[in-house]
Image (spheres, rainbow, N blue to C red):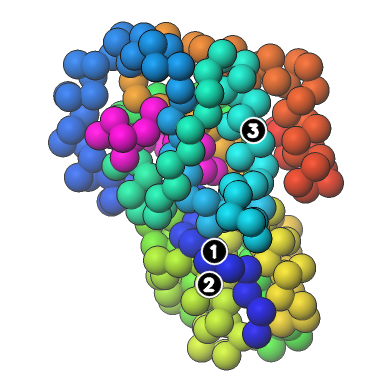
Amino acid sequence: MSFVPALRAARRLGAAALIGLAVMTAGASAEAGAIYDRIKSSGNLVIGLEGTYPPFNAMDESGQLVGFEVDFSRALAKQMGLKPVFKPANWSGLLGALQSGRVDVVINQVAATPERQKIFDFSIPYSYSGIQIVVKKGNPDNISTPDTLAGKKVAAGLGTNYGQWLVKNVPTALPQTYDDNVTPYRDLAAGRIDAVLNDRLVVADIVKKTGDQFEIVGAPFDPQGSSVALPKDPELLSAIDDGIRALQANGELSAISQKWFGIDVTKQP
């Protein structure tokens, strides 16, 4: 079986995993106003991302970071007059690295949930996606829509909004949580689970690269935008929003999307 190398956990950290971060909120607030000045003085924008989440961010065969968010990050940093410096890390530690100041921003398909907004600032969205259902080729369990997940073993990344959505909206489903993005597809291929929930754009890439083992069923649902996560600093937030708007206006953001997806995922559907 050929799997996308080292795919890691899905894009959005859940509220429960933010409890530990919340206790440090006061420290982050104390820095507000000085963070952007520090970044400008350094000349660098330190960007946290997984580096294992194609087609958003991943290592190519030569060990170079590539992907939609890598190109977007470089373009955004250039708009801000800064040099991008990437710091790959496991998804579970990315927002912690942002909270502690080890990175300046996180650009890794992060949604601005109400829980996160208590701790971090979020830019205007730079892309939009939704949740997609993936099943084993042939769809032996006749899954077609979210309601048909009832009573099924459904994989969702540990601490992601996919799992939260499933528990809230299909309470009779049997959630199977994973801390990586490879094992669920191995279990799906082996028949140990019935379906996987993941980002619709990531799913398309996985299905393409794994041949005829899986298929996408139904339309994407629960659409959400992805934003740059940053410490609470109004000046930094304004600079990032201005940079994104400039990339939208000059067509560069749309061109980056077309390069990686063949469609424009940067506009709200």
Residue at (53, 29) in percent of width and height: 84
Q: Are marks 2 and 1 in contact (CB under 8 Å)?
A: yes
Q: Are marks 3 and 1 in contact (CB under 8 Å)?
A: no
Q: Amino acid at mark 3?
A: Phe
**Secondary structure beneath label 2:** loop
- Neighbours of disc 1 within 10 Å: few (<14), some (14-19), many (20+): many
The answer to which of marks 2 and 3 sits earlier in the sequence is 3
Left or right: 22 as drawn, with respect to 133: left
Left or right: 179 as drawn, with respect to 58: left
Residue at (77, 48) in percent of width and height: 261
- Is 245 rendered above or below residue 191? above
Q: Which numbered disc covers residue 72?
A: 3
Q: What residue is disc 2 on?
A: 182
Comparing 127 with 79, the one in front is 79
Residue range in magenta is 97-117
Q: Position of residue 100 (x, y in %)?
A: 25, 34
- Is 244 rendered above or below residue 257? above
**Secondary structure beneath label 3:** helix
- Residue 112 in the magenta stretch? The answer is yes
The answer to which of marks 2 and 1 sits earlier in the sequence is 1
- Is 152 rendered above or below residue 242? below
Q: What residue is disc 1 on?
A: 7
In three-dimensional space, the C-alpha distance between marks 3 and 1, rounded to whole angstroms, equals 20 Å
